[in-house]
Amino acid sequence: MIPFWLKRGYYAAMWFPMRLNGALYRAARQPKEPVNVQLGCGMHHYIPGWVNVDGNIVTARPDLWANLLDPLPFRENSVKVFYSHHVVEHLPEWFLSDHFRNLYRCLVPGGGIRIGGPDIGNACRKFMEGDMDWFSSSMPIARRSLGGRFANFVFCGGEHLTALSESYLDELATDAGFVDVKRCFPGRESSLVGPEVLSKEHESDPDVPHTVIIEARKPLS
């Protein structure tokens, strides 16, 4: 994992270039037709045919270099689908309401979001059951105890800035104006995306998934 101080320094130094790059994309490079967008593509989850966004140009491979803490670099009513998998938990909790409103602003009427992250509800359930095997023993820190593994899942060595659940994601989406909010099983359920996206979602527990995913739509009118 990249040290927190180094990551913070990188984003501070690159704040203006990223913001400028996003503004230039929105003004001159964004296609006229609505696009599909992945926020936080990283290195291994690039989706061909989508606009893949990331703030990291060292270990990621974005089509669009932009900081998700800035206003999203897309025009209003210009995106068909936003996909974000294990990303929003890395954003400050106080910022999430603004982030969901930003998603809503950029979507075309009838467009949708698919947002997923670590399921704190299922983690608590498995912690109370004493199920050591549900939790990773080494990510991001090697831990032998149930409590240590639970802390890894929730905090990820300080990388996670909020805890996600179905009800919380529903609240964020509903407050932003989204409708038809529903939970989807990772990797196999969607009314918005196809196999090019679902194939990126790994889930080892078919009964108690590690990831909570919601989909929602912007109203047509």
Image (cartoon, helix red, strand yellow):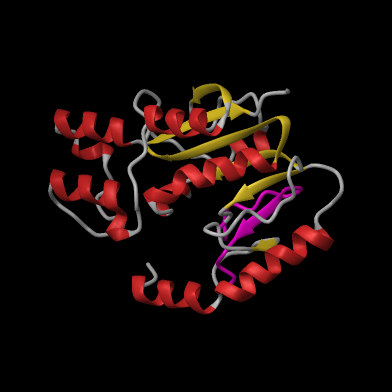
Q: Residue at x 38, y 32 (%)?
A: 168
Of helix, strand and loop, which mostly describes the magenta segment?
A: loop
Q: Residue at x 24, y 38 (%)?
A: 133
Q: Is residue 209 something one can see in this rendering?
A: yes
For residue 152, side relative to residue 218 (left or right): left
Tell me if residue 183 comes above or below residue 104 in the rendering: above
Disc tally is 0
- Quadrant where the image shows the C terminus: top right
Q: Residue at x 36, y 33 (%)?
A: 165
Tell me if residue 221 comes above or below residue 99 in the rendering: above
Residue 198 point in image, percent of width and height = 59, 35
Q: Is residue 30 part of the magenta span, yes or no?
A: no
- Quadrant where the image shows the N terminus: bottom left
Residue 141 point in image, percent of width and height = 25, 60
Residue range highlighted in magenta: 42-57
Could you say which quadrant of the image residue 28 lies in?
bottom right
Residue 167 point in image, percent of width and height = 38, 27
For residue 29, side relative to residue 12 (left or right): right
